Amino acid sequence: MSIEAHGIRKKFGSYTALDGVDLNVPQGKLVALLGPSGSGKTTLLRIIAGLEFPDAGSGRVLFHGEDVTDLPAGKRKVGFVFQHYALFKHMSVFENVAFGLRVRNRAARPSDASIAERVHRLLELVQLDNLAGRYPSQLSGGERQRVALARALAVEPRVLLLDEPFGALDARVRKDLRRWLRRFHDEIQLTTIFVTHDQEEALEIADEVVIMNKAHVEQVGTPQQVYDRPASPFVYQFLGNVNVLKVPALEGAGRRGLGPEGPDPEGQIYVRPHDIELTAHDAGSSGISAIVRHIHAAGPQARLLVEQVHSREHVEVEISRSELTNLGLRVNDLVRLRLRQAHSFDEDYAI
Amino acid sequence: MPCAPPGSLLPNTLFSLVPTLPQPTSSRTLNAAQRRANRDPAWARWLLTGVALVFLAFFLVLPLLSVFVQAFAKGGAFFLSAVTEPDAMASIRLTLLTVAIAVPSNVVFGVAAAWAITKFRFPGKSLLTTLIDLPFAVSPVISGLIYVLVFGAQGWFGPWLIEHNIRIIFAVPGIILATTFVTFPFVARELIPLMQAQGTDEEYSAVTLGASGWQTFWRVTLPNIRWGLLYGVILCNARAMGEFGAVSVVSGHIRGETNTMPLHVEILYNEYNIVGAFAVASLLAILAIATLVLKSVVEWRQTGNA
């Protein structure tokens, strides 16, 4: 089931949560809505679910081409998992999962036996069948999360919507669970949208990432596309570390790869720390002269903070540990910087 | 600190290298030190407890005891005749009738108001929240007078009511109205903070799973608020039985007709029928004590289920 949203606007009082947002999620994909808090991503998710409605006359929500904008949440057949799971505290795990089936009208309600069978099948799917009799308060965060997922799936939703699915979990469980969710999605093949503010999470498991900022969609693409070719300074800064350098500072960098006209001399250049090459400051070498100010070598990569000799601007550089050993660098050593890949947004100019 | 994961050798080997810390020579010195550090001196504890108990004895236990002592001052037979005398029986019936109407109405109003305030955004919400407290804020006498001014013979609806031969003031409907008004905040006040703390996610969850509004209320909201609701009902009930001021204004004190138990107690007392007054009062006291016990049980269940 594909999901489309066109020109969605939503205001809460004077606050604009969504300002003409378009979204297109193809059938069977796992899509991340990524953005800082207040970017409107959760509001968009709730509008798709039917828990909020777009401002009058502003936009449409389509499921597989069918207009569902005016349909209430209960009629849309969406599975929604809340950030804090919103399990029914007074019901056992079994009853939580069975809820969606039990509230159906008499004609559509399955028999008790087939409800039981279906609930157990779902609990097996999320690997919790042994906990059917427990209450939510007796479960760990990760277990609650999976119960919420099983409960959402019980109504055989057409799409699955997850609001910050890993937000309330500690770091280790989070990593395990997101890989599990990816495998789970590959297994059930249900069109899924999840909201997150964690770029690592989005880039790791999503087929496609929708980056939102200030009520707008900034960029849509595969994780590799958005990471390698950010469409705006915001996306550049939001996805991983980036150095923002003034163009004049590049004087003497050898202008490697720069076209004859070059970028706007007053503009800015975006460079990721791992796209900078460090070389020894020899007589014949070229590049920006800089002084090593700090070396942080605990971790898989060595991170260096260097200061440009001319502009005194600081630049973060990431190189491999072995490269650091080969260069034999120490604090206050002189080095040269070369930019392997950089980006300028002045006139959509890529170096 | 969690213990080291199994298989990790480091902590054990480390611990064997670290010299053991000097242990306190006796546990008694440790306890004494603890006591000094986090407890008040003994005399302060005794003094404070003593003051509280003496205060309680003088202002609560003694008066309560005197109610029962006075009630039985002329023996059990007199007590029985005082509470089974027709006017007393009428006042008991009227009080129970009032409670039977006022409490359920306030449960419905209270749940509806709390639901509206906590689950929806609408204009005038803060005004409604303030208005709910109004019956607590104004004196009960004024609450009674409001009804006299609206429904009394000289009131706004007075002529119309007389024309249609409907009696509200100095009759049972007025008593029920005044009692309902005075006890209105109890259920709503109890539920609003509870429902606010619980938020709306569970309700939204139920809705996305296809539940109707009615199903969401009965299957999700009500079970979540049941102990708070019961607590509110108990407090509402206690106040409804004991309400004096507002009811006194609208009742007209017609013996055997518009006297509730508190009013009947006052009349007997003013007639120097002290034992009769206390006999009826003791019934109210028993109802109050039963309410308190019930309240404690509910509170205990509530914390047990939190």
Image (tube, coloured by chain):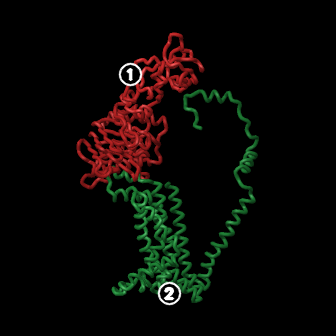
Chain colours: A red, B green
Q: Characterize the local packing of mark 2: few (<14), some (14-19) or many (20 or more) Cα atoms within 10 angstroms.
A: few
The amino acid marked with disc number 2 is Glu
Q: Where residue B230 sits in the image (x, y, percent)?
A: 47, 64
Q: Where residue A33 sits in the image (x, y, percent)?
A: 37, 39
Residue hosting label 1: A261
Query: A38 above or below B14?
Result: below
The amino acid marked with disc number 1 is Glu
Q: Nearer the viewer, residue A93 or B150?
A: B150
Image position of A110 (left or right of B256): left
Residue hosting label 2: B85
Residue, far bottom: B271
Image position of B231 (left or right of A97): right
Query: A205 above or below B218?
Result: above
The number of discs equals: 2
Query: B46 above or below B74?
Result: above
| Mark nearer the viewer, 1 or 2 | 1
Q: CA distance from mark 1 to mark 2?
A: 110 Å
Host chain of mark 1: A
Q: Characterize the local packing of mark 1: few (<14), some (14-19) or many (20 or more) Cα atoms within 10 angstroms.
A: few
Query: B202 above or below A221?
Result: below
Q: Quadrant of residue A195?
A: top left
Is residue A59 visible in the rendered structure shown here? yes
Q: Nearer the viewer, residue A238 or A323?
A: A238
Q: Where residue B70 sits in the image (x, y, percent)?
A: 61, 82
Disc 2 secondary structure class: loop
